[in-house]
Image (cartoon, rainbow, N blue to C red):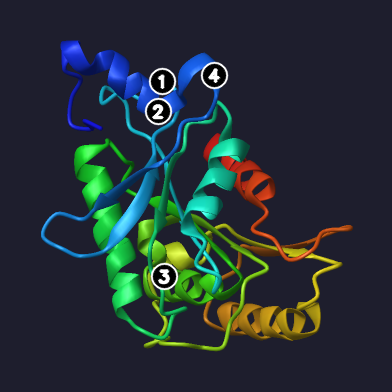
Amino acid sequence: MICRRFVPGLLLVCLFVQTGWGGVPAEPELKTVPGGSVQYYLSLPKGWSPKSTWPIVVTIEGSGHDFLRNCRGFIQARGDGPFILVTPLVTSNGNDPADEKAVLAIVQELQKTCAGRPKFFITGFSAGGHVTWQLIFHHPDLLAGAAPAAGAFRGRNIAGISTAAERVHLPICGFQGDKDSYLKYLGPQWLEVEQLARKNGYQNISHIMVPGAAHQPFAKEVLNFFSTVLAK
């Protein structure tokens, strides 16, 4: 895929990579950060053009590390929405600080090459919640919004909490299924991290219990939430 500009002879190819034939969502492209080793799946939205800027959504997969399935789910949920979707292939479940650095490097690359907006959205499913909360607590000034989805929290690699003014109104919404088999663990973890966040000045926090839902990334709900943030 060519993100920097449209080359006339390759325009059709670029559009196919974005949307597929006949409106069928295209497969995401596996890419690597230049000069680095971290890979990520990337999917540009329908109608992408470098003449505009586009909101980036980073989706952090859980401990199952089925990155392609995670990205495909968000592509399906996005439909004709404007989001650049990126799923980093980070594997430490928040135990290695390099995962957080990798996410930031990927976002910076997309801001340079794919007209990504200065602030990005992030969502983390299950164990992906660890990296999600690291970014919430360390870099609220870089985020447009955050949505842990059945997200875990055990304080992994939380090296201090930012005092940036942006933390106060940063939109954070957690999604949880009331039929989640891990609810007895994740429920108390949400209460713990919400209390920690509020204690440190994060005020725009909500939590939605989804009736009948099991352990899942809530792609549709997450993107709907981010859409409401964009609309404000």
Q: Position of residue 31 (x, y in %)?
A: 27, 49
Dot 4 or dot 2, earlier in sequence = 2
**Residue topped by disc 4:** 23
Q: Residue at x 29, y 58 (%)?
A: 39
In the image, which disc is placed on residue 226? none
Of tags 3 and 2, the one toward the viewer is 2
**Residue topped by disc 2:** 18
Secondary structure beneath dot 4 equals helix
In this view, the residue in front, 146 or 2, is 2
- Kindly indicate the quadrant of the structure image that contains residue 18: top left
Label pair 4/3, CB-CB below 8 angstroms: no
**Residue topped by disc 3:** 135
Of tags 4 and 3, the one toward the viewer is 4
Q: Amino acid at mark 3?
A: Leu
Real-space Cα separation, disc 1 to disc 2, in angstroms: 8 Å
Q: Position of residue 2 (x, y in %)?
A: 21, 30
Label 3 crowd bin: few (<14), some (14–19), many (20+), radius 10 Å: many
Label 4 crowd bin: few (<14), some (14–19), many (20+), radius 10 Å: few
**Residue topped by disc 1:** 47
Label pair 3/1, CB-CB below 8 angstroms: no
Q: Amino acid at mark 2?
A: Gln
Label pair 1/2, CB-CB below 8 angstroms: yes
- Kindly indicate the quadrant of the structure image that contains residue 23: top right
Of tags 1 and 4, the one toward the viewer is 4
Real-space Cα separation, disc 4 to disc 2, in angstroms: 10 Å
Q: Is residue 10 above or below residue 180?
A: above
Q: Is residue 119 above or below residue 82?
A: below
